Image (cartoon, coloured by chain):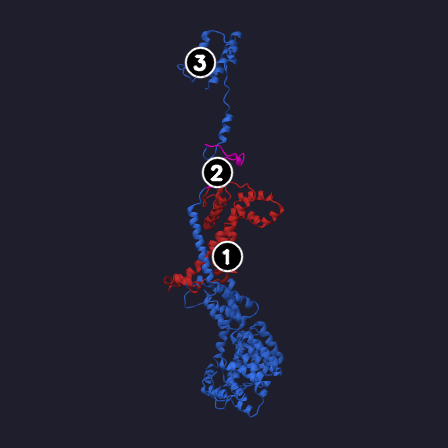
Chain colours: A red, B blue
């Protein structure tokens, strides 16, 4: 399973790199020692940085939540163009011609070359979709961090438990799913189904 | 070996010698040192300090009293556990400083190493990559922003289609620019429901490809990646609509061809109506009905029969008969028969059936102003002129850019029938000066100006008619001479403004 996990991380390397970057930044904010800053590795730490376990209350939650949230926002932003063209319009032809910015940029290169225009029309939204997909697949924290968060969550008072419950459960469920590469498969299926509908 | 251990050995040796002398028996058990002394590997030439000391003691022959040795301090043996504890307190990174236990009993880093790890720098490559991602994200926003107008138009179209305003939806989609094959699926459905069949072919050509179709044009990579596959399971609705459309068009072309040449000759005035072999053509169509199996084909046969009857002026009953046959042959082809059938039913006085058709038109397409137009026509024939005008005023207010000129025309007729010439003029003037200038509106405008004693406008209208190689309708003169009433003009059968006997082309 580690092999499959590593493969999914390399296939979605933009999201893995940004996730690790955000985790590192959070470690700096929380003053956590970082033992290994490599993000793309060939073991189960791929896509994450190795850091000291968090024992302060709520800090574990923020360490798990903020990087995931930032990756999610980045994913939404990056996939917007792809969603409009692939899912909403199914528009693989003509958005370059309809778009003044792109027409000016590519006018001389694309003039009279229908296949090139069509290829660019097709690939550009797909590229943006892949970038967004990469971000979504790399949202969950490490299972160890999620476990530490679980211990801390138990000690919260009722109000805080309710407040943090939705994101807590998403991270708790997402962490093992991402560890076994299930999030990759899940988002891939969603992407294909939405493209057809 | 430490000094402390040597003293201990000497003491043991002395005790052992003493015991031997006492027991006068060799006592193996008190020779713990023997194994050490008898270490075979030790060369005899090299004596250890201990052995040397033992020899000396033996040589002395003095009895060494244990008490004499008691004053010699004995160094306690090494305690290894103390050394282990000292090693574990050191930092596991640097191995020099003690671990900072303020972070926990099991913590194994010193303060300096911890600080160094906290300040571990972020990889420059990661930062660069992140900046690149942000740049790409910004570029994506720019591209998306440029498509907002398309999205808005498509969204409006879906909303309008959802509330059954099909014409408005089609108009929104037309203004959206390039809409993509997914939205084109919806557009094809809208065109089919609204009756704008030509839009079906243009949409399918622009946004779909059919790999199985036999065509001289080879399928290109641009087609495959840029268009929807017509044979894909998720596009089967589009394929059916397109297939039905092609079947209908094939049927129409096939049966229109029976009299197309006469139609053209009549249009250009090369022949007269009496020159058209009406009976022969009708017979031909009736024969075709016997062999035609498709409902679309049967519908178009009846439609062509109606067209022929209308062209040859065979009367309202004949036309109504054929149009009802179209409905019977293919009830789904509402775009083919509904409008004309309703008009014929109103002319024939079948107001209930016409009212039901108007309701059906509006159910299919809430934008179909013909539904309201025919309702106003029914009200007019029932003498309810004010209600008819109110209905047409609502249509005028609703229709964008005042484009539905039939509403002005119908309102003008109703105002005329209730003798309000000024009001009638206000409506008909819009038609006359707009895009609904034809023989009827020109004559009606002339008549109204004459009744309003506006000679200037009346003359201008006459000039307009004559400039189009036409003459003033005899109906106008008959009305002015009070030979016919307004109701007979507009509530009869056929055109209210008949053309003079010497026919000339009137500009429509």
Chain letter of mark 2 equals B
Foreground: B404 or B254? B404
CA gap, disc 1 and disc 2: 47 Å
- Tell me, yes or no, whether the two marked residues, 3 and 2, touch with CB atoms within 8 Å: no
Please identify the quarter of the rendering in which residue B335 is found.
bottom right
Q: Is residue B177 above or below residue B349?
A: above
Task: From the viewer's side, name the closer residue of B441 and A130.
Answer: B441
Q: Quadrant of residue B383?
A: bottom right
Front one among B260 and B193:
B193
Where does the N terminus of chain B fall, quadrant-wise? top left
Where does residue B407 sit, x and y in percent of width and height?
Answer: 55, 79
Percent across and percent down for residue B218 are 41, 65
- Is there a contact, CB below 8 Å, between mark 1 and mark 3? no
The residues colored magenta run B96-119
> Which chain does the numbered disc 1 sit on?
A
Mark 3 belongs to which subunit? B
Q: Which residue is mark 1?
A: A192
1 or 2: mark nearer the eye? 2
Residue at mark 1 to residue at mark 3: CA–CA distance: 90 Å
């Amino acid at each position: 399973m580690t092999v499959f996990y590593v493969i999914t991380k390399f296939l979605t390397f933009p999201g893995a790199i940004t996730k690790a970057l955000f985790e590192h930044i959070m470690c700096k904010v929380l003053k956590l020692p970082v033992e290994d800053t490599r993000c793309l590795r060939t073991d189960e730490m791929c896509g994450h940085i190795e850091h000291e376990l968090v024992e302060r209350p709520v800090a574990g939650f923020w360490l798990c939540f903020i990087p995931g949230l930032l990756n999610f926002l980045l994913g939404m932003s990056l996939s917007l163009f792809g969603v409009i063209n692939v899912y909403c319009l199914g528009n693989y032809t003509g958005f370059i011609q309809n778009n003044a910015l792109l027409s000016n940029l590519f006018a001389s290169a694309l003039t009279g070359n229908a296949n090139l225009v069509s290829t660019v029309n097709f690939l550009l939204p797909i590229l943006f979709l892949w970038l967004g997909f990469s971000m979504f697949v790399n949202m969950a924290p490490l299972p160890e961090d999620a476990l530490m968060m679980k211990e801390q969550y138990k000690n919260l008072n009722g109000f805080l438990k309710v407040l943090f419950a939705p994101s807590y459960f998403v991270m708790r469920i997402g962490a093992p799913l991402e560890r076994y590469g299930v999030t990759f498969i899940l988002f891939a299926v969603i992407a294909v189904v939405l493209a057809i509908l | 070996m430490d000094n402390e251990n040597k003293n201990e050995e000497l003491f043991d040796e002395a005790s052992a010698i003493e015991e031997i002398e006492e027991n006068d028996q060799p006592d193996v058990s008190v020779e713990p040192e023997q194994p050490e002394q008898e270490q075979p590997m030790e060369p005899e030439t090299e004596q250890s300090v201990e052995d040397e000391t033992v020899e000396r003691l033996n040589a002395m022959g003095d009895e060494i009293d244990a008490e004499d040795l008691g004053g010699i301090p004995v160094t306690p043996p090494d305690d290894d556990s103390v050394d282990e504890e000292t090693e574990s307190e050191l930092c596991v990174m640097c191995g020099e400083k003690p671990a900072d236990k303020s972070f926990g009993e099991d913590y194994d880093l010193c303060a300096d190493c911890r600080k160094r790890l906290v300040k571990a720098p972020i990889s420059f490559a990661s930062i660069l990559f992140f900046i690149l991602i942000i740049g790409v994200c910004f570029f994506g926003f720019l591209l998306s922003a440029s498509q907002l107008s398309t999205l808005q138009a498509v969204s409006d179209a879906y909303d309008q289609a959802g509330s059954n305003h099909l014409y408005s939806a089609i108009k929104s989609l037309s203004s959206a620019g390039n809409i993509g094959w997914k939205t084109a699926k919806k557009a094809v459905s809208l065109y089919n429901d609204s009756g704008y069949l030509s839009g079906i072919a243009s949409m399918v050509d622009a946004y779909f490809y059919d790999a199985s179709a036999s065509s001289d044009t080879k399928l290109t990579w641009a087609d495959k990646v840029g268009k929807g596959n017509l044979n894909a399971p998720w596009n089967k609705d589009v394929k059916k609509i397109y297939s039905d459309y092609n079947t209908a068009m094939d049927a129409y072309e096939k049966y229109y061809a029976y009299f197309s040449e006469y139609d053209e000759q009549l249009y250009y005035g090369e022949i007269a109506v009496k020159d058209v072999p009406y009976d022969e053509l009708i017979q031909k169509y009736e024969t075709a009905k016997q062999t035609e199996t498709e409902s679309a084909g049967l519908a178009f046969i009846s439609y062509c029969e109606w067209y022929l009857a209308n062209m040859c002026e065979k009367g309202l009953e004949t036309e109504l008969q054929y149009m009802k046959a179209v409905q019977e042959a293919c009830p789904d082809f509402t775009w083919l028969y509904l409008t004309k059938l309703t008009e014929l039913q109103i002319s024939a006085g079948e107001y209930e059936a016409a009212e039901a058709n108007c309701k059906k038109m509006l159910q299919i397409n809430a934008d179909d102003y013909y539904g309201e137009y025919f309702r106003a026509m029914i009200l007019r024939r029932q003498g309810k002129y004010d209600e008819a005008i109110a209905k047409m005023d609502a249509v005028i207010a609703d229709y964008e850019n005042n484009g539905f000129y039939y509403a002005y025309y119908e309102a003008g007729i109703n105002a005329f029938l209730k003798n309000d010439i000024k009001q009638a003029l206000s409506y008909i003037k819009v038609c006359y000066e707009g895009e609904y200038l034809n023989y009827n509106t020109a004559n009606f405008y002339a008549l109204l100006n004459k009744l309003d004693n506006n000679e200037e406008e009346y003359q201008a209208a006459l000039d307009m008619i004559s400039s189009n190689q036409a003459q003033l309708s005899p109906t106008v003169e008959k009305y002015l001479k009070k030979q016919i009433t307004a109701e007979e003009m507009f509530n009869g059968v056929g055109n209210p403004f008949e053309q003079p006997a010497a026919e000339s082309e009137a500009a429509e």
